[in-house]
Image: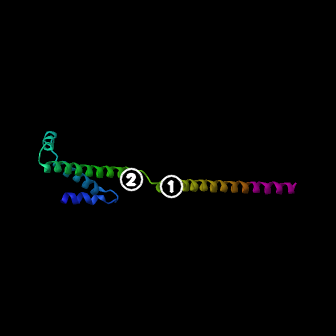
Amino acid sequence: MAERQSSDQHDTPSPPGKDDMIGCVMALEAALLPCLPARELQAIDRSPHPSHQIDVERHARDFMEAAKKLQLYFISLQREDQPTKQELLQKDIAMMEEELKTKTNLIKKQERLIQGWRQELKDQLEKHNTELERV
């Protein structure tokens, strides 16, 4: 009964964790432990006692439930590894912001160079104008 309660705890769609995985493995183990070798299962299947057949069906059902929970757990782990659309967009935005910052810095550097060249040209023009006035 306690095994059944522990496996029922994992029906909630909470994010999977280590405890969830351990619970699923324990449920699988509990479902597998009472399983008998194939010859004995066949003998029980032919048994006139209906309780034997019910036990086999119950163990098979418990095993399938635990296997399904474990499968869902592994599927959810796979989904966790894949970034969400929001995370992808945030990453793209961060990359674009970094690129914009780099290009803005490059533009500022080039503007300073152009300002320096303008100043040099002004100085040369003044120098030439003063020499022309002397002549």
Who is closer to the viewer here, 76 or 111? 76
Residue contact between numbered discs 2 and 1, judged by CB atoms under 8 Å? no
Residue situated furthest top in the rendering:
39
Who is closer to the viewer here, 43 or 73? 43
Disc marking residue 80: 2
Horizontal side, residue 13 vs residue 135: left or right:
left
Residue 31 in sight from this viewpoint: no
Find numbered disc 1 in the image and state the secondary structure of the residue it sits on. Answer: helix
Going 20% across and 57% down the picture, which residue do you hit? Answer: 3
- Decide which of tag 2 and tag 1 comes sooner along the chain: 2
The residue wearing badge 1 is: 89
What's the magenta bit mostly, secondary-structure-wise?
Answer: helix
Q: Which residues are magenta?
A: 121-135
Image-quadrant location for residue 46 = top left
Residue situated furthest right in the rendering:
135
Horizontal side, residue 27 vs residue 71: left or right:
left
Q: Where does the image place residue 112, in percent across and percent down from the top left?
A: 66, 56
Q: Where does the image place residue 115, in percent across and percent down from the top left?
A: 70, 57
Q: Is residue 127 magenta?
A: yes
